[in-house]
Amino acid sequence: MITTKVVGLSDIKATDENINGKNTIEIDGEVMKQSSRFLNSFVSRFGFGKQTLSLFSMDEVIERLIQTRYDREIQVALEHTDDGIKCLSVSSPTTKLPRVGTLIDILNNRGIDGLSYDNGILTGSFDFTRISGLKIGDDNHKSGYHIQIPLDGYGKPCTYLQLLREVCTNKMVGLGPAWKQVINIGDNNDSEVIIRRFIDSYSNEEGIAAIQDRMEKSMITPASLSEVFKAQRLLRNIETPVSGDRHNTPVDKWLYKFLKDSDKYGIISESDISEKVLKMIPSKVSVYGLINLVTEISSHFGRDLPLIEQMKLDGFTGTLISDNYDMEGFGKGSGFDDELVRDTYFQACDSKN
């Protein structure tokens, strides 16, 4: 359950306490956990950069705001669970939160898939019913969009285009500015009505055509060593059942198959050579194969990850297909072994049971 409370700036104090490994904040005399969105919402509300908090303490910043601002009241959104209270975010005292029950009914009645909640944000996916299936190479894909709806008053609802690779239900969310559509609520108090109208009318043939074009190009483009190393760094820092020893994971070994020829260039690790040169050296996997590896892990192994971790995986693929590939137009890389990663997952799960 999420509730709101209007407090003065003087009612907010920094703390050194820790609750279950989480940072805390004192609000109106009560110490509680703070979400990862709290600081972002705070600096956004008062219009200063987050780096300010690395130069001054939270209490010093609040004291200065009290001295210089006339709008000294803020609304805090509080999440109540069996583990206690968490401060999700802050917003203007006039911000109205969505009616969660009404919103969930709207989403369910329109066939949302994978509806979930984490850290103040409701997420799920819809298929585009007016856009027919896509053929990319030998793979059939369904098009749709991923929707994110803040329930705590911080940020606007938005959508990101997505593709579902049907052969193994890999879902690729284009989590990047090029594939994003903001749902502008404005000052309308009936945000649920605006969201319902958006879902009922939204279609983006042009955007899906652009994604299809980028994916087709990814199939004939070898991933550069730079792109493979970036995927490796990302996956090492995401906790999944295939993580294990982060520098000797089964996924690492799979990636290494496409790096192993790099030793003929005298490259032992990415630190041996500049980023500019790494972008010019092909690996033995296509960009399409690299995308499918990350989406395989995101779709099947990352379902229990916190939203912020899921967004890192989706952000990697969304950004990758938004930009020109490092080696676009330079020939073809190899494909993607679905079974290898899937077998890796089950072996890892069995070893933990």
Image (spheres, helix red, strand yellow):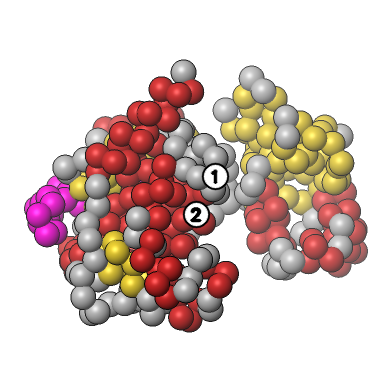
Q: Which residues are magenta?
A: 128-147
Q: CA distance from mark 2 to mark 1?
A: 11 Å
For residue 156, which numbered disc appears in the image? none
Picture layout, residue 119 above or below residue 105: below
On screen, residue 161 versus residue 19, left or right, reads left
Query: Neighbour class for label 1 at 10 Å: few (<14), some, many (≥20)?
Result: some
Image location of residue 17, percent across then percent down = 84, 36
**Residue 202 belongs to the span the image colors magenta:** no
In percent of the image, x 57 and y 69: which residue is there?
271
Report x, y in % for residue 119.
56, 39
Q: Which residue is mark 2?
A: 234
Residue for badge 1? 246
The quadrant in which residue 290 appears is bottom left
Q: Residues within 10 Å of mark 2 (few under 14, many from 20)?
A: some
Measured from the top left, where is residue 245 in percent x and y?
54, 40
Residue type highlighted by circle 1: Arg
Left or right: 127 as drawn, with respect to 196: left
Q: Nearer the viewer, residue 247 or 64?
A: 247
Q: Secondary structure at mark 1?
A: loop
Q: Is residue 346 above or below residue 288?
A: above
N-terminal of the pair, mark 2 or mark 1, is 2
Which residue is painted at 85% across and 46% down in the image? 14
Residue 222 can be seen in this image: yes
Q: Residue at x 49, y 40 (%)?
A: 243
Magenta span: chief secondary structure: strand
Can the viewer see residue 181 in this picture? Answer: no
